[in-house]
Amino acid sequence: MLPLFTKRLLHWNKKENQREMPWKGEKDPYRIWLSEIILQQTRVEQGWNYYLKFIAAFPSVAHLAGASETKVFKLWEGLGYYSRCKNLIAAARIIDKEFGGRFPNQYEEILSLPGIGPYTAAAIASFAYNLPYAVVDGNVQRVLARYAGITIAVDSAPGRTAVNNLAVEWLDKKRPGEYNQAIMDFGALVCKPKSPACSECMLKNSCRAYQLKRVAELPVRQKKIVKKSRWLYYFLVWHQNQVYIRKRTGEDIWQNLHEFFLVEEARPLSKPNWHNHPSVSTWFNRSGAAVTAVSKLYTRQLTHQTLHGQFIEVTTETTPSLGAEFKAIPLSELDRYPFPKFIITYLQEKNVNLSQH
């Protein structure tokens, strides 16, 4: 017999849940996987168009596996958390090579793919193959913690165990996909982080948090995000109507995206004399460089850090010695390369001026 929570949740899903998404009800594991990876750390509203663009460009695992990394990253451009894109490409190539292009249909095999954790593996297994695995994301944690009155921090080991145990216990083993979608939608539409619709909730009479007037306090989290600030100064170095770019390769934000010559500082530069800055003085002076424009200050907030920076346009009389990783490209080819949104914002605003080079 199904628990009361499960029965009422499925009743709500059938009678009241009107949430629409292009991947909802999807049975193709490739499309489910694609939607889940895109939605990691991304709002549904933002991920919607990216999902449609990816499906159009890469209708199957084989298409994605055979695409160039630059093309895939360019399509991902602006979505952020680019390690997701790197893992997407790696997983597609493993599926194409080791599974003959067929998405694996066993939970452990799905879990073994790069970029796939227990939540994503459970989502694919239940939605595509109707396997009895419970999804546990932020929405599910919140719903279960409130309903059961779990006061242990859900991001602690005991808290995760308590939530996961409930998720498995209350899962409808015969309809796992339907149940998983219902509880995620319920967390997004009713049991929301802020201003939950408790007055309209069919579970309120049996919800511990509602009964104890502790809805706003739950779920409890112990971790506090420590944010740092970074100051980025990008030099757009122009020579003979070409600008120099490179691909980021380090284990940092924006890996595999492109950028201009970068000087990073721990704190903002005060009235900088660019010619004498130690990071640029050598090539700056030898190549007869001149600063032609300095942008306003740009700021972008990421989950764990705040980025501040400026863009300095420079023209050089001779070829600058920037390093072997840099290559010169004409302005007309700039849009072929994927850049982080921090740089895209500047390029979009300065398009008219840049076209003059």
Image (tube, rainbow, N blue to C red):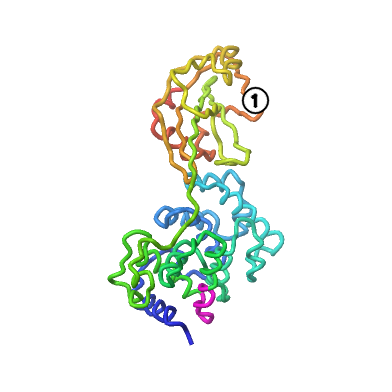
**Callout 1: few (<14), some (14-19), or many (20+) C-alpha neighbours within 10 Å?**
few
Magenta residues span 166-176
Q: Is residue 253 above or below residue 110?
A: above
> Residue at coordinates 69% horizontally, 64% vertically from top-left?
99
Q: Is residue 230 above or below residue 216?
A: above
**Please, which residue is most extreme toward the bottom here?**
1
Give yes or no for residue 169 being in the magenta stretch: yes
Q: Residue 284: x percent and y percent?
A: 56, 16
**Please, which residue is most extreme toward the right here?**
98
Quadrant of res 198: bottom left
Q: Is residue 159 above or below residue 277?
A: below
* Label 1 sits on residue: 323
Q: Residue 278: x percent and y percent?
A: 58, 18
Q: Residue 30: x percent and y percent?
A: 57, 63
237, 148: nearer the viewer:
148
Quadrant of res 277: top right
262, 322: nearer the viewer:
262
261, 219: nearer the viewer:
219
Find numbered disc 1 in the image and state the secondary structure of the residue it sits on.
loop
**Please, which residue is most extreme toward the left here?**
199
**What kind of residue is marked 1?**
Gly
Give yes or no for residue 137 being in the magenta stretch: no
> Residue at coordinates 55% horizontally, 13% vertically from top-left?
317
Total count of labels: 1
Q: Residue 320: x percent and y percent?
A: 60, 19
Q: Is residue 145 left or right of residue 106?
A: left
Q: Is residue 129 above or below residue 224?
A: below
